[in-house]
Image (cartoon, helix red, strand yellow):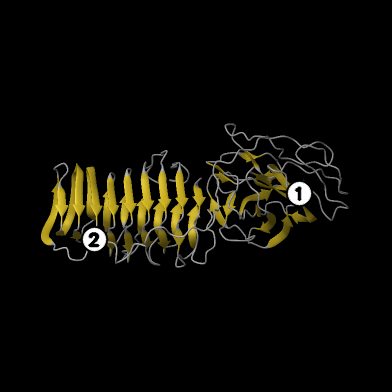
Amino acid sequence: TVGTRFTPRTSGAVVGVRFWKQADDEAEHDGALWSQDGTLLALVSFDDETPTGWQTADLDRPVEVTAGATYVVAYTSPDGRYSTTSDFQGQSVSPELQVDDDTAAVSVSGTGIRFPSRGEHHRQYWVDVVFCPGASGSPTSIPSWSATSTPTATPTWAPTPTASATAEPTPTVTPTPTPTTSSTTSTAPKSTATPKPTSTTTAPAVPAPTTPKPGSSNTGVPAGVQLTASGGTTVTTANAVLDSLDISGTVVIDAPGVTIRNSRIQGDGVYGVQVVSGSVTITDSEIAGFENAITGSGWTARRVNIHSVTGDGVKVGSDVTLDASWIHDLDPAPGAHADGVQMQGGVTNLVLTGNTIDVGSDANSAIFLAPDLGPSSAGPVTVNGNWLDGGGYALFCVDGASGRYFVDHISITNNRFGSESRYGPVRINVPVTMSGNFDASGTLVQG
């Protein structure tokens, strides 16, 4: 369910609900109007929809709304396809209605029509009301209109409906075709620009996992490997290999092409493996006891067992791949913003695939993607085929610094979410491509 939060500047009545439909959206839709506290005021189904453009459903009876009070209008998107604009900075086309570009968008995951209480900064879902300022009582007939014709019925009250609550898009975004955004009972609808969607969610058939779930039997040091004790070290030789070592302390990478394999790295410092320059590939190894297991850019970790850290499992930069690894049993220090995977910059080429990341109830999230430190980047970021659980939300994917920074081309596909996250599986307020994500009950997870 996605929607728009709005505030009437003058009292009146809501007589309809509208949303912008994509050409490939073939689902059935319901709309609703709520008060700010989640009280359901009206429920409506969309019948006789057109293939694309604005879809309008008339309420069975007008709902009176009060100036200065806040309301939410929303609709369901059962197959996960909806129109959205990120970094939205438009304004309401109606002087009678206030739409805040920073807090208007709201959403909630799950099936059926539900009150969307989760705010989305600088985002617009293109859900709308038809509003009659100053109206009271019930009209003898509800107005009827479309994007291409003059209204055919007139209510008995005197006031004329004004432009809808939907905010006006920025000039750089233009749909094809252009819909109307206002409705009157005496004149043809007024045309305004409406954006083409910037990202969508698709819902394919439930695929079976194609790889084994990482855990104690298929991550870490392989059975039978004899380890040799070693201290922490700084690697400055290109293509160096650290093999079958039991390392106490931090490994600093300051050379290209380094390999760490079949090894255990333990300690209580800030980092287990710190990449300051160059690159490293870590395979079939265990990292435990540090504040953060791995940090930096230019690293690959495959079949690595990461646990018992007091901060983040891994801090990811650019050119990073985490594959078939197991992050679990975090031990967050008091006040720690502990994540299994934490991204805080505008990264490029980040791949998280086929991992088990279960951080428990005391952590913040299994995967946290928020470029708060900037800059914005074009990505890409791939989150595919993971098993995720724990934290407030298992997956955070949000803008950085309250809408200042963004990472584009984020793909979240074929992940499985557990049931132990406090608030739900995902928290997303930026455009992403989503498909094939399911929770523990088999319900499709949508952004």
Residue 280 visible in the current orientation: yes
Residue 346: quadrant of the picture: top left
Where's residue 11, x and y in %? 75, 51
Q: Is residue 205 above or below residue 172?
A: below
* Amino acid on which disc 2 is placed: Glu
Q: Is residue 55 left or right of residue 140?
A: left
* Amino acid on which disc 1 is placed: Asp
Q: How many marks?
A: 2
Residue found at x 70% / y 37%? 179
Residue 62: quadrant of the picture: bottom right
Residue ranking furthest to the top: 171
Q: Is residue 114 above or below residue 122?
A: below
Where's residue 166, x and y in %? 66, 43
Q: Secondary structure at mark 2?
A: strand
Q: Is residue 433 left or right of residue 338?
A: right
Where's residue 135, x and y in %? 81, 50
Q: Earlier in the sequence, mark 2 or mark 1?
A: 1
Q: Is residue 7 above or below residue 286?
A: above
Residue found at x 67% / y 58%? 34
Residue labelled with disc 1? 48
Q: Is residue 206 left or right of residue 287?
A: right
Residue labelled with disc 2? 286
Give the class, few, some or many, for how many residues have Cα within 10 Å of label 1's Cα (few <14, many ≥20). Answer: few
Q: Is residue 32 left or right of residue 200?
A: right
Mark 2 and mark 1: span between their CA atoms? 59 Å
Give the class, few, some or many, for how many residues have Cα within 10 Å of label 2's Cα (few <14, many ≥20). Answer: many
Residue found at x 76% / y 56%? 63
Where's residue 339, x and y in %? 36, 58
